[in-house]
Image: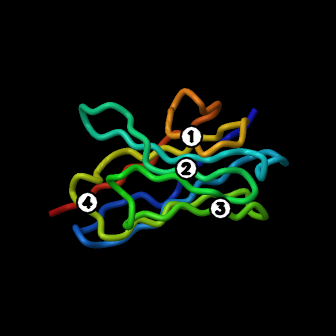
Amino acid sequence: QVQLVEFGGGLVQAGGSLRLSCSASGRTFSSYGMGWFRQGAGKAREFVAAIRRSEGTTNYADSVKGRFTISRDNAKNTVYLQMNSLKPDDTAVYYCAADLGGGANSFSNAYDYWGQGTQVTVSS
C-alpha cells in the first residue's frame, strides 16, 4: 500500500507561480513512476506531467510544456510540480499518482495509487 499526500495548492493570480509537493509512503519510492493529473469543474481528469523512476525522464502535456516542471527527490520520497505563468484554465484539483511499473505514463489507468488532491485556483 502506498499513501500519497499533496501539498501546496491555493489561490494565485494569473501569471503567478505555485509549487505542489506530493509525499509518498513506502521504502521503494525511487522505483515508482510518478504523475500529476488535474480535474477542473465539470471536466474529465487530464494528464499534466510524469516522471520516470530513478533517472527521471519526464513527460508533459502540451498545455503545460514550458510552464510546468516535474521533479523528484528520492531521498525525501517526494515529487514536485513547479507551475509558472499560471492561467485561469489551470484552475483544477491536482492529483499525484504512483505507477508501480515505474514509467512516465500519461494514461491514468497506468497508475496504481492516487492522492486526495489539492485545489489550485488561478484568478484573472
Q: Which residue is mark 2?
A: 50
Q: Earlier in the sequence, mark 3 or mark 2?
A: 2
Residue 5 falls left or right of residue 120? right
Q: Which residue is mark 4?
A: 122
The residue lying at 52 percent from left, 57 percent from top is 7
Residue 20 falls left or right of residue 88? right
Mark 2 neighbour class, 10 Å CA radius: few under 14, some 14 to 19, many 20 or more: many
Where does residue 79 sit, x and y in percent of width and height? 62, 57
Q: Amino acid at mark 4?
A: Val
Marks 1,2: beta carbons within 8 A: yes
Q: Quadrant of the C terminus?
A: bottom left
Q: Which residue is mark 1?
A: 105
Where is residue 98, by image quadrant? top right
Where does residue 94 sit, x and y in percent of width and height? 43, 47
Mark whose residue sits in front, 3 or 2: 2
Q: Which residue is mark 3?
A: 72
The residue lying at 60 percent from left, 33 percent from top is 111
Marks 1,4: beta carbons within 8 A: no
Mark whose residue sits in front, 1 or 4: 1
Q: CA distance from mark 3 to mark 2?
A: 10 Å
